[in-house]
């Protein structure tokens, strides 16, 4: 049972692509625009037409016994699978995570009139 949720961003590069892979990724680039990015448990991949790299955003539920390393490992496995689903491989993954319990929302205080 998940007791915490982490928001994870995985950045990486595409492994060397052949012409077919490049064409297929460019054809679907609009579907993977940054403006379509969402943090979900399935995650979303975004990339630009230059195909220099990609970003994967996801939510990872975790138990109180799982540390950040385990959470990032799970997120990176999801990222690798998502990129493979696009017909490519990836390399040079770098990830950052945020425990959503650590986010503090500061409410604007409106001055009294």
Image: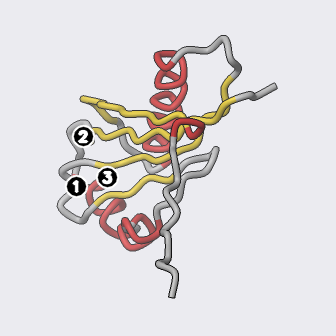
- Please say if 45 is above or below 108: above
Q: Residue under label 1, please give it.
A: 51
Q: Are marks 2 and 1 in contact (CB under 8 Å)?
A: no
Residue 97 x/y as whole percent = 44, 33
First of labels 3, 2 by sequence position: 2
Badge 3, how many Cα within 10 Å: few under 14, some, many 20+?
Answer: some
Instruction: Give whichever of 23, 4 is nearer the camera.
Output: 4
Q: Give me the residue at 35% from left, 32% from top.
A: 95
Q: Residue under label 3, please give it.
A: 21
* Snapshot quadrant of residue 6: top right
Q: Residue under label 2, please give it.
A: 13
Label 3 and label 2: CA atoms lie apart by: 14 Å
Residue 96 x/y as whole percent = 37, 33
Instruction: Give whichever of 17, 59 is nearer the camera.
Output: 59
Give the SS element for disc 3: helix
Label 1 and label 3: CA atoms lie apart by: 10 Å
- Please say if 39 is above or below 63: below
Label tally: 3
* Snapshot quadrant of residue 2: top right
First of labels 2, 1 by sequence position: 2
Give the SS element for disc 1: loop
Q: Quadrant of the N terminus?
A: top right
Residue 11 x/y as whole percent = 31, 40
Give the SS element for disc 2: strand
- Outermost residue to the bottom: 113
- Please say if 42 is above or below 76: below
Q: Give me the residue at 56% from left, 40% from top.
A: 100
Instruction: Give whichever of 14, 22 is nearer the camera.
Output: 14
């Amino acid at each position: 049972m998940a007791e915490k949720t982490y928001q994870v961003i995985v950045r990486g590069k595409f492994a060397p692509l052949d012409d077919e892979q490049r064409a297929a990724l460019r054809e679907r680039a609009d579907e993977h625009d940054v403006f379509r990015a969402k943090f979900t448990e399935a995650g979303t991949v975004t990339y630009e037409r230059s195909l220099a790299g990609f970003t994967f955003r996801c939510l990872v539920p975790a138990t109180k016994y799982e540390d950040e390393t385990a959470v990032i490992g799970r997120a990176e496995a999801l990222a690798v699978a998502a990129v493979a689903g696009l017909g490519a491989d990836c390399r040079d993954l770098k990830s950052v995570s945020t425990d959503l319990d650590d986010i503090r929302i500061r409410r604007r205080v409106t001055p009294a009139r």
